[in-house]
Image: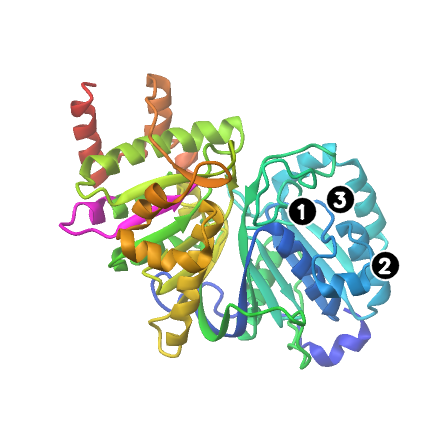
Amino acid sequence: MAGDDADKATKAEPTIPGIDDSVEPGVWRFVRARRARVIVDAADYFAIMQAAMLAARFRIFLIGWDFDTRIHLAEGRFWWQRAWKKKYPARLGSFIAWMIRHRPTLEVRILKWSFGVFKFTYRGSMWIDLVRWIGHRRIDFKFDSAHPVGSSHHQKIAVLDSSLAVCGGIDMTGQRWDTRDHEENDKRRKTPNGRRYDPWHDASMMMEGEVAEALSDLGRDRWIKAGGKPLMPIRAPEKSLWPEGLDATFENVEVGIARTRSKHRDWKAIREIEALFVQHIERAQRFIYAESQYFASRTVGEAILKRMEEDDPPEILIVHPEHADGWLEQQAMDHARAELVRCIEQVDHKGRFSIWTPFSGETPIYVHAKIMIVDDEIFRIGSANLNNRSMGLDSECDVFVDSKRPGNEHAADAIAALRHSLLAEHTGLDEAEIGELHARHGSMAALIDHEQEPGGRTLQRYHPPDLNGVEEGLAESGLLDPDDPDDLFEPFAKGGLFRKGSRLERIRSKVKRTRGK
């Protein structure tokens, strides 16, 4: 760091104290946030992040699955962009270089999953950015390969001056930008190469306060594990980085942080996210609203099956893409989803479980968000999907606000408003009417069935397709979606998705008998 940073930093640490400890099962730390804003969809996310980065003076620390310096961050959607739009570039690579030139005390550290280096072959101008950055000692772009073969670095975290942090599902890369309108033929929705792509739904949460220092600890530890030199911790500056005029979703709340990390070298496995999913599913009394890119987790499937077998189970509604993104992902996730849903439907005697795909007109919207809302009491967001990899193989980070925690009671109304807002986005209904409609119909599924109109934005119910023998075998093995590094090479060693003696295996046998297989 530059000399002016000396009063903001202390001696560098070779390791981060308490990084491997959990305060309770499923939770790494509980920390305070002065305020937090849930940001839905990347048009707003990119714009808000650019405004926040403009205020940073000491460190911009970006951690992600992917980055593409060719993307444009903003198009003047907020007043602060209109005021500055001719003073700084919108293109990410040029913007970072501009920040380094105009902020003499600033450093930029970027950590990206190593496998993505192959994508650079098709990102010619990004190579130019990286070469240009080499001459700046205050810019460091590092590839993270500190994980077992077959796993990935999947966290999406940003920390600015240890004062402001973001955690969620949005990467600063191509094919993410979209507005909450998800217009079917929005001409602005195109990759840096100019290729058009379909509507994309995503979400993240910006947080200010002690939570940023905790996520800085997590990021600095990951930086060291990826081979980087220890980064000195920064004391948060007195001046807030929060973009002026940006409303907060939550104020003065306690935030929980949960992680996934696979066992590697001498680092122990961490499966806090898996434990927390089970806790949240078990806790639900009335309903769970979730958004996820995948639905293929054995652990989550078992937990939902257990709830559906109860006399009066909660409603569980999942918003989900029509298909996984890419042929290989479809083989791994789509077939397992079909088998899991078939098992759940076998015991869902009250019809409380459903999966839905959002559409804009006739075009499916790809769901990349990772959100869970329980009884309008818990709001959870992060990088973890409802698949096996996110439970034990990939590096993940989720954060949550629980209104039943002491001091968080005031957050319940905001959590309910978030659920109403998301349902309204997907159905095209009036956000102000969602609460009353839910109460009138008695369930979210009935609300969707009876209130949304065809055309525009709608949710369409998922029905599991029939699979052939090869597809069933892939689903059962978990070959392409393991939850442990050892299972990559011995997919049937532990029984795959339907492990012997498990609830899933028992119900799966009933499904096969019912279907005459």
Q: Position of residue 28 (x, y in %)?
A: 43, 65
Q: CA distance from mark 2 to mark 1?
A: 24 Å
Q: Which mark is residue 70?
A: 3
Q: Position of residue 281 (x, y in %)?
A: 29, 54
* Mark 2, residue position: 86
**Residues tagged 3 and 2 counted as in contact (Cβ below 8 A):** no
* Mark 1, residue position: 67
Is 12 a magenta residue? no
Q: Which amino acid is tagged 2? A: Lys
Q: Which amino acid is tagged 3? A: Arg
Is 316 a magenta residue? yes
Query: In the depicted view, which residue is nearer to us: 54 or 126?
Result: 54
Q: Residue at left 46%, top 74%?
A: 253
Q: CA distance from mark 1 to mark 3?
A: 9 Å
Is residue 156 visible in this depiction of the protein? yes
Q: Residue at left 44%, top 60%?
A: 432
Query: In the depicted view, which residue is nearer to us: 266 or 476?
Result: 476
Q: CA distance from mark 3 to mark 2?
A: 18 Å
27 over 131 or under it: above or below:
below
Q: Residue at left 35%, top 73%?
A: 405
Q: Secondary structure at mark 2?
A: loop
Crowding near the residue tagged with mark 3, few <14, some 14–19, many ≥20 C-alpha atoms within 10 Å? many
